[in-house]
Image (cartoon, rainbow, N blue to C red):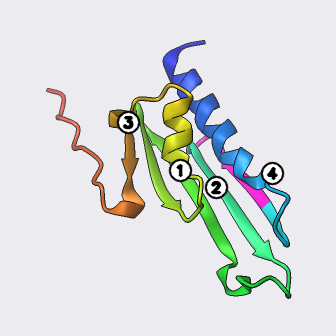
Amino acid sequence: MDRVDDLTAIVQHEVADYANVRDWKATSYYIGDEKQQRYTVVVIPEEDHPLVSHTGVIVMARIVGNKVIIDEDITDKPLYEELIQRGIPREQIVLAYAGEKLPVEPEEH
């Protein structure tokens, strides 16, 4: 398995893991698009949940080249910390939701 496959497998697994939380009154769904390398968890709270207005994406990440771009993360267990624990260097992670910009790749001639 090469490094890109490792990166993809780690991101898929870690994002999908957010859908496995069972201690809230909500239904969660993992949505993975392997072709575009986009991975998301959506949560739909039950009617009596205190955060019922927060239906939607709780975490979303994508892979661009050898970078992990985290577009959304409203969890109390940040995805970037989980990715670092799995061996992905911080400099390979972009927190787009926090205003970090994707580095511009130099053009090939």
Quadrant in which the N terminus appears: top right
Q: Please tell me the numbered disc located at residue 61.
A: 1
Quadrant in which the C terminus appears: top left
Q: Which residues are magenta?
A: 29-35
Splitting the image into 4 quarters, where does residue 92 fall?
Answer: top left
| Residue at left offset 56%, top offset 45% | 36
Q: Amino acid at mark 4?
A: Asn
Residue 79 in percent (x, y) is at 55, 48
Tell me the SS state at disc 3. helix
Are the residues flagged by discs 1 and 4 in contact, CB closer than 8 Å? no
Are the residues flagged by discs 4 and 2 in contact, CB closer than 8 Å? no
10 shown above or below 95? above
- Indicate whether residue 87 is drawn in magenta: no
Question: In the image shown, does 34 or 86 lie closer to the viewer?
Answer: 86
Question: In the image shown, does 46 or 12 lie closer to the viewer?
Answer: 46
Q: Read off the residue under disc 3.
A: 90
Q: Please tell me the numbered disc located at residue 20.
A: 4
| Residue at left offset 30%, top offset 48% | 102
Q: Amino acid at mark 3?
A: Arg
